[in-house]
Amino acid sequence: MKIATFNVNSIRTREPILLDWLRDNRPDILCVQETKVPDEEFPADAFQKAGYRVTYRGEKSYNGVAILSRELPRHLSFGFDNGHAADETRLQCADFRGFTVVNTYVPQGRAVDHPMYPYKLDWLKKLRAWFDRRFKKRDKVIWVGDMNVAREPIDVHNPEVRANHVCYHADARAAFEHCLAWGFEDVFRKFHPGPGHYTFFDYRNPQNVQRRKGWRVDYILASRPAAGKARDAWIDLGPRLKSRPSDHTPLVAEFDG
Amino acid sequence: MKIATFNVNSIRTREPILLDWLRDNRPDILCVQETKVPDEEFPADAFQKAGYRVTYRGEKSYNGVAILSRELPRHLSFGFDNGHAADETRLQCADFRGFTVVNTYVPQGRAVDHPMYPYKLDWLKKLRAWFDRRFKKRDKVIWVGDMNVAREPIDVHNPEVRANHVCYHADARAAFEHCLAWGFEDVFRKFHPGPGHYTFFDYRNPQNVQRRKGWRVDYILASRPAAGKARDAWIDLGPRLKSRPSDHTPLVAEFDG
DNA sequence: GGCCTGATAG
DNA sequence: CTATCAGGCC
């Protein structure tokens, strides 16, 4: 099973890049974030014509998650099990052939002194509690998405100056590690232990892409039983190098079964 | 001599369409309107590389005229001879091999009850007075551009409902005819006396293009001595049918000499 | 720098 | 519908 995650930064603007990528890569499951479109305006037709079923929950301008998959998921839910509609455009959970796929768009946090930062930390805490309630260690869970956290120094191109960045600040990293500590393995890192692998390159300095100065903030994480089936993982820089790109690029993994 | 006029509705956005069109048609002179770019940001390099010299006067967001030509014009001026800088982005005059080319972007007028409408009528009056001052009947003058006026019923797809449209209202037509009465012939009409020839198709109903529901508001007009040399004229719908088109499309004429 | 909005313009 | 802009966001 080939599964990918891609923060598209507007699914409408990225439709041509997505269709090319689906045609060339044919993943079984593609989880996307930041669709930035209300459900009634989601461009589902184009993806259906390309052979993909689409499930999504979005809002105008902000957030929005979707799963494009060759088969329809057996079970599907959005948000935490607490009735907060706000989280439905950041968290999606779907079952495919014995795997449970969790697709998240973790709040970015804006700035460490902004109210959105405690919201981010709290959101990660709620996510861990949701993992505890929802899954057993023996479940084959694959948690993917834009986590808006770089785990380690090698996950940012210049960690020395990032201590106060919301995506590298100690508290954000600790909150993310606490989620991982539920029982997830970092599938990409398993296959690529070295530095210099990034999934996000800020638009503001266009040279960052060619110079490979980015962030690894998108992940494919797997519970022990799922991680055992991981065969390979890679970052595809192609879409980031096209014209009118997202600032993120796809991360892909293959699992047996 | 092959001369063309094309309201590009942003020369930046239309650069690819323009470069293709110049490569395929190789006019001696292409007059463009609505460049929508300040002079310091005009993308002259791309056209120079394509073998064209460029003269232009524009402003941010609105208006802007330019002439792309294989040879540099001998004489060049912008605006009326009254020192009003505002008109310099709507009126350009350049000499080429014995012809004087006048390139205009006539004010659209917004609505018949809007202050821009009397401004439009007044602008056409000033233009006629400028013709009177500036040219002799024996001059070979070619006046081209987006005139924002449909002369006759056959120049709009449904004239019955257009009586109060700023581009077909009786006052606008009279003011335009008064300009023509200086001594211009309608070169396109000479070769194509029938209905159904349009140079503009409103974006607001995308089906208008395929259904050929448009307006003839762009013209190539010639003083008697120049009109005598006109060999052919045609509208090229090609650029209007491409992706990300202008709402106008090029009008072309060939003159002997 | 490129996404979004909501305004103005044609 | 397709341009422009400013202003918010990341």
Image (cartoon, coloured by chain):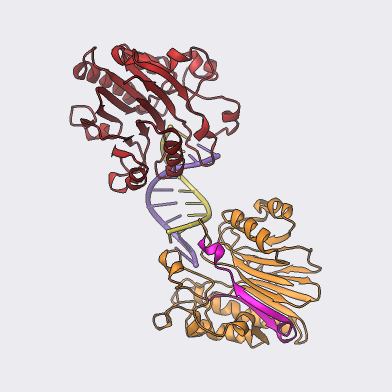
Chain colours: A red, B orange, C purple, D yellow
Q: How many marks?
A: 0
Q: Quadrant of the C terminus of chain B?
A: bottom right
Answer yes or no: is residue B67 visible. Answer: no
The percent position of residue B212, horizontal first and vertical second, equals 46, 72
Which quadrant would residue A86 be assigned to in this image?
top left
Is B232 included in the stretch rendered in magenta?
yes
Quadrant in the picture for residue B138: bottom right
Name the residue located 47 percent from the left edge and 76 percent from the top edge: B166
- Asked whether residue B6 is drawn in magenta, I would say no
Q: Which of B148 and A225 is in front in this view?
A: A225
Q: What residue is at 32 percent from the left and 45 percent from the top?
A: A44
Instruction: Assign the N terminus of chain B to one quadrant of the image.
Output: bottom right
Percent across and percent down for residue B148 are 54, 74
Left or right side of A74 for A64 = right
| Residue A37 visible in image | yes
B82 or B209, nearer to the observer: B209
Taking A162 as reference, is B72 left or right? right
The image position of residue A206, as x and y in percent, is 58, 34
Give, as a single range, the part of the protein colored magenta: B216-241
Question: Which residue is at a point 38% across and 31% down the rendered structure image?
Answer: A27
Where does the image place residue B255, in percent across and percent down from the top left? 73, 77
Q: Which residue is drawn at 60% across and 68% down?
A: B250
Please, is residue C8 above or below residue B169 in the view? Answer: above
In this rendering, position of residue C4 left or right of residue B14: left
Find the residue positioned furthest to the front.
A257
